[in-house]
């Protein structure tokens, strides 16, 4: 190899090294270390605000469990599919949102089984999680849910968005979450939708990431 050829090869190698180093330095960090996981849950969809909600969640890097009512899933299958396409997890929140503890076992079974079928028919898969309306439960409700392969999920923190909580109050409620805990939110309130970007910021500032809810423990864990 001539001296001229050797110098040319060295120059090319140096240029490639510089380019690779620059590219590596400039590459943005897309992942944040997670010191824990929390379960964001939204009840009572799908609704007229579902599209905006899932868009806001996706834009802010959040995933959530959607506890859908069966009657709404049956009436809006495209919205259920949109939830799934956005990376959300779909769960059972009864068919008509009654006080289940006031119903017979057969009526409870109908509420749960019809919702399982409606969500499945809409393309939401077969739910593994169940939230009784109002968080009201008893041994019969738990037993019927278990027969359908469902784990009952209540919540650790109530955002009070159903009760007219302000956007600030909803954001502050997420600041109380700790690793593994689940928060109650709803698909519908305007203040909840407005809170989504700040919820993402609050969680990230504490090293918490949105997780899936384990059917085994009922706690939020890293998405698989």
Image (cartoon, rainbow, N blue to C red):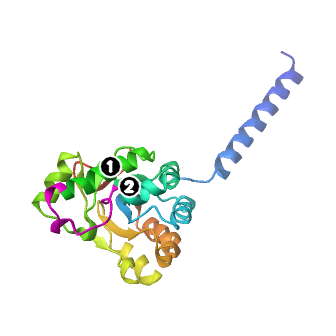
Pick the quarter of the image with the C terminus. Answer: top left
Q: Which residue lies at the image location 17% right of the left edge and 52% below the top edge?
A: 144
- Mark 2 sits on what residue? 211
Residue 201: x %, y % from top left: 49, 69
Magenta span contains residue 95? yes
Magenta span contains residue 66? no
Q: Secondary structure at mark 2?
A: loop
Q: Which residue lies at the image location 45% right of the left edge and 53% below the top edge?
A: 88
Residue 196: x %, y % from top left: 50, 70
- Mark 1 sits on what residue? 116
Q: Residues within 10 Å of mark 2 (few under 14, many from 20)?
A: many
Residue 12: x %, y % from top left: 80, 32
Q: Is residue 130 left or right of residue 196?
A: left
Identify which residue, 157 or 81, lies in the foreground. 81
Q: Is residue 31 above or below residue 155?
A: above
Magenta-tinted stretch: 92-106
- Furthest-top residue in view? 1
Q: Is residue 106 left or right of residue 206?
A: left
Q: Nearer the viewer, mark 2 or mark 1?
A: 1
Q: Are marks 2 and 1 in contact (CB under 8 Å)?
A: no
């Amino acid at each position: 190899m001539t001296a001229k050829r050797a110098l040319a090869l060295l120059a090319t190698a140096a240029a490639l090294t510089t380019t690779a180093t620059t590219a590596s330095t400039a590459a943005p960090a897309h992942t944040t270390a997670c010191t824990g996981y929390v379960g964001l849950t939204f009840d009572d969809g799908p609704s007229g605000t579902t599209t905006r909600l899932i868009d806001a969640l996706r834009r802010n890097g959040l995933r959530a469990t959607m506890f859908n009512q069966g009657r709404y899933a049956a009436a809006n299958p495209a919205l259920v599919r949109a939830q799934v396409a956005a990376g959300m997890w779909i769960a059972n929140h009864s068919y008509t949102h009654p006080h289940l503890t006031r119903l017979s076992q057969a009526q409870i079974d109908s509420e749960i089984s019809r919702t399982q079928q409606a969500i499945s028919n809409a393309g939401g898969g077969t739910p593994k999680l169940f939230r009784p309306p109002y968080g009201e439960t008893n041994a019969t409700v738990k037993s019927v849910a278990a027969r359908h392969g469902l784990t009952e999920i209540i919540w650790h923190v109530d955002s009070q968005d159903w009760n007219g909580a302000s956007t600030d109050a909803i954001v502050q409620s997420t600041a109380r979450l700790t690793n593994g805990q689940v928060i109650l939110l709803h698909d519908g309130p305007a203040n909840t939708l407005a809170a989504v970007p700040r919820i993402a910021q609050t969680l990230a500032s504490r090293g918490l990431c949105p997780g899936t809810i384990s059917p085994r423990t009922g706690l939020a864990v890293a998405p698989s």
